Image (cartoon, rainbow, N blue to C red):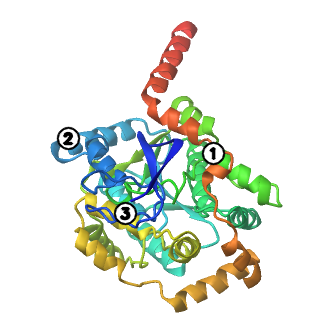
Amino acid sequence: MEFEKITGIEERGETVIKVKSEYKICTRCIMDTTDPEIVFDENGYCNHCRWYYANVNKIVFKGDDAEKRLNQIVEEIKANRRGEYDGIIGLSGGVDSSHAIVKTVELGLKPLAVHFDSGWNSELAVKNIENLVRKLNVDLYTFVIDWEEMRDLQKSFFYASVANADVPQDHAIFAALWKIAEEKKISYIISGSNYATECILPTEWGYDSKDSKHLKAIHKKFGSLKLKKYPTMSFFKLYIYCPYIKRIKSIPILNYMPYVKKEAMKILENEFGWRYYGGKHYESVFTRFFQGYYLPAKFGYDKRKAHLSSLIVSGQMTRDEALEEMKQNYYTEEKIREDKTFILKKLGLTEEEFAKIMSLPKKTFRDYPSNYMLQTFFNRYTHLFGRFLRSIKTNLISKSS
């Protein structure tokens, strides 16, 4: 097998090695060389599942330890309630966020559900959300994005020819939650993000959507409108202002309890009339088309491999079951054509323009300005920054008293 070492790039502490020719698949999960930066060891295990097993106990808690930590979190949230709600939770209608809000209510907390209307909601997503908030007796706040700005951003990312064309949607969802939490004086954002079903995703397939520098750089080059209403989250606000000055915390609540996706889906279906979309994040028409057609057709990336590999390493699915699942075609050619027609019309693109987009040379996030190195450095030394900022705050308080 022929390898090419890429200098100056490091993924989760490992030097990246790029496979130039021969196809290879992990012998433990189903990640393969369609990830251009995958690394295999002598056992055929990939860097993704090795990273999972090395770090799982630091992030996912089990048994008595999980219960103790969860109880402490609930007590902390209740003790620090500043208004009408204990926390805010983004509700897309997908499995993770739906299960998270159910568990949040069961824990005796009063959340404000926030739904982000990006202009791409499926009818089924709207119905699932309505059923959940009604039966849980939870207040719902809908944040409606400025459609012209969203359209301009999404077209910009298509023309930038990067893999993660879903950044405009994801960044706005994230930024809107923090914005609403700050405005309503809510100290906790309860997240459906979880390690059990989302621990694997190659950086090349889905670069961090929270990077506002990356988003603005692409829009500046390819966009035509000035962003006036679109919510953004700067590096300073994300890592310093909100967590340490405004004291807003993000709680990935599903990491503190057993989370089995199939069991969660059964509960949602039986008790809340919830219906499945056929794929992870398929509650958004744009995301369904992006993941089910755009990424595989243009880049050769099938995110199902990452989603199913996450389930394999977390013990929710066997490797053989995942390989069988990959043979299933839930996103039919007819549905692809239907979605494509709808999306191109809504974005104002012709078939010829989209064909040009699909034929553009493939780029990576590294071809555009970003906070990648800064975020990597900060994430590695977060504990030191937190200790430093807390000491400054303590000194300021003592001087003023």
Q: Amino acid at mark 2?
A: Asp
Q: Are marks 3 and 2 in contact (CB under 8 Å)?
A: no
Q: Amino acid at mark 1?
A: Met
Residue 340: % across, % down: 63, 83
On residue 65, the disc is 2
Which callout, 1 or 3, points to the residue nearer the camera? 3
Name the residue: 68% across, 50% down.
Answer: 368
On residue 233, the disc is 1
Tell which residue pokes out farthest to the front in this image.
2
Name the residue: 38% across, 35% down.
Answer: 79
Tag 3 residue: 31
Residue nearest the observer in this picture, 333 or 185 = 333
Q: Secondary structure at mark 2?
A: helix
Residue 263: % across, % down: 25, 69
Residue 200: % across, % down: 39, 56
> As drawn, is 68 to the left or to the right of 121?
left
Q: Is residue 259 in view from this perspective?
A: no
